[in-house]
Amino acid sequence: MAAVTTPERPVVATAVGREVERADARVKLNGQAEFTGDIRVPGMLYGAVLRSPVARARITRVDVEAALALDGVVAVLTGQDLLDMDPYYGHALRDRPIVAIDEVRFVGEPVAVVAARTLAVAEEARNLIEVAYDLQAPVASLEAAVRSDAPQVHTTRARPGFAHGLGQLPDPEGNVCYRYGFTTGDVSADFAGADVVVEGEYRFPAVYQYSLETHSVVADYRGDEVTIWASCQHPFLVRQEIADLFDLNLDRVRVVVPYLGGGFGSKSYTKMEPIAVAISRKARRPVRVVNRVDESMVTTRRHNMVCRMRTAAAADGTLLAREADFWLDTGAYADNGPRVTATAGDAAPGPYRWRSVRVDGRCVYTNTAPAGSYRAFGAIHLQWIGELQVDEIAHKLGLDPLEFRCRNLLPVGGEVRAGAKPLDADLVGDLRKVAEAIDWGAPRPPGRGVGLSVGLLAAGAHPVSMATVRLGADGGATVLVGTTELGQGARTAMAQIAAEVLALPPHQVVVRGTDTQYTPYDRSTGASRSTTVAGKAVELAARDVLASLVETAATKLDSDAPLSARDGGITDGERWISHQELIRARFGFAGGELVGQGRVQPSRGSGSYAEGPVFWEVCLAAAEVEVDPATGVVHVMRTASVADVGRAINPQLIRRQDEGATLQAIGNALFEEMHYDPEGLLLNDTLLDYRIPSTLDVPEQMTCVIVENEDGPGPFGAKGCGEGAFAGVTAAIATAVAAAGVPMRELPMTPERVWRRLQERGTVEQTGELR
Amino acid sequence: MKLPQFELHRPNSVDGASQLLTELGDDASAYSGGTELLLAMKLGLIKSRHLVDLKPLAELRGIELRPGGVWIGAGVTHREIESSPAIRAVLPPLAGMASQIANVRVRAIGTIGGNLCFADPNSDPATLLSALGARLRARVNGESVEFSPEEFIEGPYQTLLRPGDLLLGVWIPALPAGSAAVHLRMKIHERPSVTVAALVGVTRGEVVAARLAVGSVGPKVLQVELGEELRGLSGVGFSTRVRSLMALLAGSIPLLPERPESPEYQRHLVRLLGARALEAGLEGARN
């Protein structure tokens, strides 16, 4: 028998739970990381998109002669080029044409695309296209859209999309394209019998996801195949949508995803890919389409919303009932609006023990840019409202907001929504941790306020993910998984998971970007699902490889002792054989590799949204603010959020997630807002007018409390994070500002709005208050 | 967004630059820091095919402490002003103001001359310079001429310079004994929403001189001499008078149209910050 121990046995530390350096840090810092905009394909042309200057009109004429005549122009695509196909797409509702056909529905809607040898020529040609519009009065606001005599943004009913995941879609009513609601208990009776009732109407702004990289695509349509390089979060859903649109087999559509310069949901589902593919098909050449920032701001955004809510409680401090009616403005096309509406509906009650609840949410078309996914959608819309009302009741009853919440919060295993997964987190324990982090009970001077917030976000999306792990003859591993690295550190986490199973140093595991031609299927990157769902597939694939290693080792060691992976090899506790040696032994040759497969699929029923979610992501935070009563300026002094992650694969990445979400929450809560004029024109589409948070907005103290109860469905008991803090901190800032004496009913809480609210409340003498 | 094609000229003297700019006329722009110009060109708002680079010109460089004040060349960057030991010693509010402009990348290449010549109405330097009684020296039609900041900037993005004219630098008189200058601003968006600056002089605790400049709200900087109104006042009398003066001024100051904030709120901020600046000026002058 050959020697089964080697003197070179290394010592390999456990991979999971360590703050492993990001796998992409070096290439990103030295500028070598490749993004879609860096891709150059031989023969590639540059695309420029002509966008509608008006919000609602019939297109009566499009003249492309002058554009085509320009030297260097290869092709121009208009709605008339789409008559030989079914040009409508949309994963929820198939309501959107690739480019406008006969009518435009928002300012910025693509009307034509030019492909030319240089970008300058493409842009010049685009400006030569003449379009005649027969103007119609736009439906430019939610209020206008829900009027009984409102014009219809869409006059024909859209077919359901391939991935709406919402069961039977209700009939559209006017401009309401989707409706989600539920009732439990006897709401009327509980409100009638309540000792305290609070109610109000609240407004949430349209905001832009603002990733540094804009939407970027290179499409190369040849014969009956298309290759797409795209800045997309959901490559496999893009593949399916493109295949449907252009009537291609799935395996004839190849989507390649380099690094993304941020996404936050703005690159979920399908965005600029259909346009790029359509112009490439027409030009018979590869074409690059890269949005400017102002173009991306009309490609997708977050839903603005109006909400009416009321909450009832008993004098003894028991929450009784809640009602919420809300209207989400999804713009001219549904995009992910229906799912946002359903998620908002689920977030509306808040995780309390209600006797009765009634929720009614509407997803409404208007003539504005389409709204879709943005980190923590739904929860961020409703949580701040519900939590403001919880505080208002606590205030009326003279109860401490922390104890009031703890008394009413759902326990572990509690029913969040009928038929859904029971609560899988310890909310009371989490809440006490964030309260402690900001010294909840400490006395504060006037103008200061501390606030808490608790919520839940249905996370995980549809749990379908596959992964492949290949262990090479040299002991290095490659993970093939469809998760998109968009800055969150997914490739690092996936490497750690595979490394943990195979007892390898994480840097010996390589994770590359998705290429749908080679990478196995993964539904999407979003809904905080990657570590939990795709990560589980990686763990299973690595375990599949491990099983082969153990099989060979058992033969070689001729041992009945249990075998396990240690230090880059397999051991029975005494003896140890390296992976390299096992592979050599298995194939009898200095080569070969072990390939493992991992698969995650719904554990029960259809895996539909109704039976979900994969896990409940906690949206739980605390904040301390200072309000300047003279100017209305709100300063966020400190925040604390909870990452209830089951098991921290990489604590450093988790903290960075919560810090990023906290900064975005400060923007959403205090100053970000897209302004439209009455004609539906976006007024602030540059960074000069649309301010996003910067390092100067970082609070003096940001605490991320990592909770590890090993209670998640993911690898090693992990569950996802990264979105909850966005909803949690936004709501905590709102409750903190209310505690400082300014209960606001509209976000963002701009200096002027806060100042006006103070004027209304007569807190400040009109003529003075200079300090 | 990429810069359109342009030709870059590098003259080696102010005379040469002026001559080039005269010849090229409306087809050329003077290029100093480029923090505003290049952005406007990327956006297609300025379509100059020639840029005349002023950065290498030694005549426009340098911060000089001279008897009675400080000379700052038009090509001096905000960063140089903010970190100049001379300015920090003699005119600390100027160094403080410069340190708050935009961000460090802009301050490292943006120049005081470029800022004044671009004449963005939402900007801090002109307002403070106005309160400090600064004189802007420019070459106009080949002659060296001096202006106050309020004269130099005629309106949004409009100065009295014509093609071929160049701003040479800024002369800032040293603060008179017993006086203090204060600069306050409020930034809600990327650019300042309200800028105020006050210069207050006292003798034996009582006001003998006061000047207030208000910018970033109207089409140009508004400067008012308040010495007569506030002379001899201190304490509560000063505060009361300041409040009524600021109410009057804030109520009548011209505002730029189409701002995100309402006129009512902007006027409130002018009143508030103006009063705060004058109060702080009095406080500073007495110490």
Image (cartoon, coloured by chain):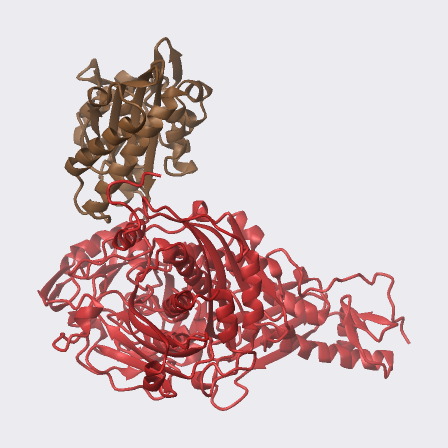
The spot of residue A93 in percent (x, y) is 30, 79
Quadrant in the picture for residue A11: bottom right
Hey, which quadrant is residue A655 in on the image? bottom right
Compared to A369, does B39 lie above or below? above
Query: Which residue is pictured at 27% across the width and 29% down the height?
Result: B127
Task: Please provide percent x and percent y for residue A462.
Answer: 47, 80
Q: Nearer the viewer, residue A368 or B254?
A: B254
Is B120 placed left or right of A208 in the picture? left
Indicate the position of residue A676 as horizontal and vertical percent values. 22, 58
Query: In percent of the image, x 24 and y 23: which residue is there?
Result: B230
Q: Residue furthest bottom?
A: A605
In the image, farthest residue toward the top:
B67
Answer yes or no: is residue A708 visible.
yes
Quadrant location of the C terminus of chain A? Answer: top left
- Quarter of the image with the N terminus of chain A is bottom right
Q: How many marks?
A: 0
Depth check: A720 or A569 in front?
A720
Above-or-below relation of A760 to A132? above
A163 lies left or right of A275: right
Q: Colour of chain A?
A: red
Left or right, residue A201 beside residue A377: left
- In the depicted view, which residue is nearer to us: A179 or B152? A179
Which of the 4 image quadrants contains residue B208? Answer: top left
Per the rendering, the colour in which chain B appears is: brown
| A466 with respect to A182 (left or right) | right
Res. A80 in view: no
Query: Looking at the picture, how far across and down is residue B244, in whole percent?
Result: 20, 33
